[in-house]
Image: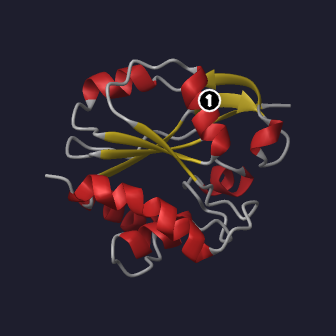
Amino acid sequence: MPVIKSFLPIINSKSKALILGSMPGVRSLEEGEYYAYPQNQFWKIMAELLNCDLLVSYAQKKGMLLRNRIALWDVVGSCTRNGSLDSNIRNMRANDLDGLFKRYRNIRAIFCNGTTAFKFFKDGHYKCPVPDFLLPSTSPANTKSFDWKIARWKQVRDVLDEK
């Protein structure tokens, strides 16, 4: 099984909230875009939270995050995995989150997209001086309703609205 690698973070010096996934799925890796699988609700949730139109191009989606002070990355930097399921992740090597926290000091909270990202983040014992939160996965494997997910993801907006 070949080693797969995550993407570079989407982040800038104004980012206040960091959303961490586990590892991009097969479709995302093929397209070189976070959350490219159409049934994944990540971009739809972000558009709803940020009161934006659901954008079509990946550049527009990344711009929406950055304009709203949201960063996006993965806990896993590389691994082997058969398919897209987090439960199939093996031989994991973590991304340098401590390095990211040192470089981007405006981060005020970390939000993990699903239990696998949260577990990997907690297992990494990162030196992160900000609170972290587990949010429900935006994956279609999580069959909870869109409204249920949105109600929980509103925590991201709360951090952005803090002065």
**SS at mark 1 in the image:** helix
User: Would you call the spot at circle 1 few (<14 residues within 10 Å), some (14-19), or many (20 or more)?
Assistant: some
The residue under label 1 is which amino acid type? Phe
Quadrant of the image occupied by residue 142: bottom right
Q: Residue at x 43, y 76 (%)?
A: 55
Residue 23 in sight: no
In this picture, residue 26 sits left or right of residue 123: right
Quadrant of the image occupied by residue 21: top right
Q: Relative to 103, does residue 34 appear above or below in the rendering? A: below
* Position in image of residue 160 (x %, y %): 26, 55
Q: Relative to 99, does residue 146 appear above or below in the rendering? A: below
**Front position in the image: 41 or 163:** 163
Of the 4 image quadrants, the one containing the N terminus is top right
* Position in image of residue 70 (x %, y %): 33, 52
**Front position in the image: 108 or 31:** 108
Residue 24 in sight: yes
Q: Residue at x 55, y 30 (%)?
A: 121
Residue at image mark 1: 120
* Position in image of residue 163 (x %, y %): 13, 52
Q: Residue at x 28, y 38 (%)?
A: 107
In this picture, residue 80 sits left or right of residue 19: right
Quadrant of the image occupied by residue 16: top left
What number of labels is visible?
A: 1
